[in-house]
Image (cartoon, rainbow, N blue to C red):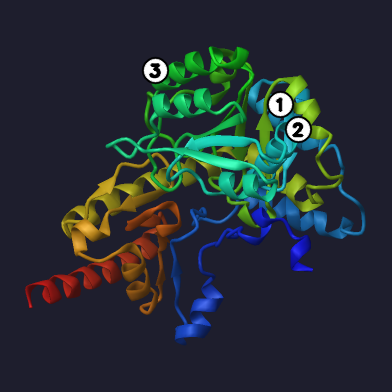
Amino acid sequence: MMSQVPEYIRTLVPYVPGKPIEETQREFKIKKVIKLASNENPLGPSPVARKAVKAALRNLHRYPDGAGFNLKRAIQKSLSISSDSLILGNGSNEVVDHIIRTYCIAGDAIVTSQAAFIAYKICAQVHGVRTLEAPLDSRMQFDVGAIAELVRKNERARIVFIANPNNPTGTYLKLPELKKLFKALSSIRGGSVLLVLDYAYWEYVTASDLPDPLSLLKEYPNSIVLRTFSKIYGLAGLRLGYGIASPEIISNMEKVRQPFNINSLALIGGEAALADRSFVKKAWKANQQGMKFWEKQLTRISVPFWESQGNFILADVQKGMGMTGPEVYQACLKKGVIFRPVSNYGLHHALRISIGTSEENEKAAEVLSRCSEKALKRKKA
């Protein structure tokens, strides 16, 4: 039977999520485990969303609204866009899959950067589509010139993926850099290359020079913006995301979308979460406090980091502690703290730390500090 499986499926390395709390408890026989590995909202979902989801449980015997009418209407009002410019996905990952299924065939290619969100590469390979990666620049930023050059040199390059801000680096592209990319893509094959702008962490952004994603659609019409309810809205467990693009692009993608791809609880929860603006403000404030805490703690133990516009921070533990990301991850795991090694992104020297609650941050920082002290003693010995 293996001979019937395409090579691109046989060689596919599946996405590996952050280690579950329950697995860590079983493996190390630890009761209290802190997970700062998956960029989840540590405050949980909005109380309004929880209440709405609980009330919807009585209707689980009914199929969900396949069109997602009410949720689309809520997003439409929130963003001042037309409902035919929206497509809903089982997380924004599914929208990525829809895009590649719609606009690529086996043998085509997508273009992104090294250390870009790995789901792009995985979704592409599932469909027999190659991934071309431009190198990061010295600031751990996407090099838009190198990305455009890859598109120019590869006639089968169909889609460019840009995460802004990017996971796992937390870095971002400013408007002048994005405009440079727009101009370059517009001059290649008549501007037919599709540009996907992944704004999963938009609600956490503090930088004033990180452009609004919706304004970018006007700058480069052949583009799609991705958003999600998994981050600041705290609905990662319900799997809900969406894409925004021209009605023509969305209409084509709708043809490959499976019926009832969004469950009824996600539809209800997303609509309620979108309306709870006070919770979003609370989560944003908590994230900023946590980010400042981690920047201070990493500075204290002399571990360099990259300034982040998400709800996580990338630390250069090899430079600061003399240990690789996986080594620090394993050492802290044994103490009941789950961070995220990012060797699968080519960043063997780094560790990604999600922002937790104040209590989680303090305890996790204490474990990381002790690990750093032990590393320093070994180095001196």
| Whether residue 367 is situated above or below residue 142 in the rendered picture | below
User: Which residue does the numbered mark 2 point to in the structure image?
Assistant: 72
Q: CA distance from mark 1 to mark 2?
A: 6 Å
Q: Residue, x 38% and y 56% (percent of image)?
A: 352
- Determine the image quadrant of residue 357: bottom left
Query: Is residue 123 visible to the viewer in this orientation of the structure?
Result: yes
Instruction: Determine contact: label 1, label 3, CB under 8 Å.
Output: no
Task: Report x, y in % for residue 156.
Answer: 62, 30
Q: Could you tell me the amino acid type at mark 3?
A: Pro
Is 18 placed left or right of 90 in the picture? Answer: left
User: Which residue does the numbered mark 3 point to in the structure image?
Assistant: 176
- Mark 3 secondary-structure assignment: helix
| Whether residue 279 is situated above or below residue 28 in the rendered picture | above
Instruction: Determine contact: label 3, label 2, CB under 8 Å.
Output: no
User: Which residue does the numbered mark 1 point to in the structure image?
Assistant: 76
Local crowd at mark 2 within 10 Å, few (<14), some, or many (≥20)? many
Please report whichever mark, 1 or 3, sits nearer to the chain's N-terminal start: 1
Task: Report x, y in % for residue 147.
Answer: 45, 29
Please report whichever mark, 3 or 2, sits nearer to the chain's N-terminal start: 2
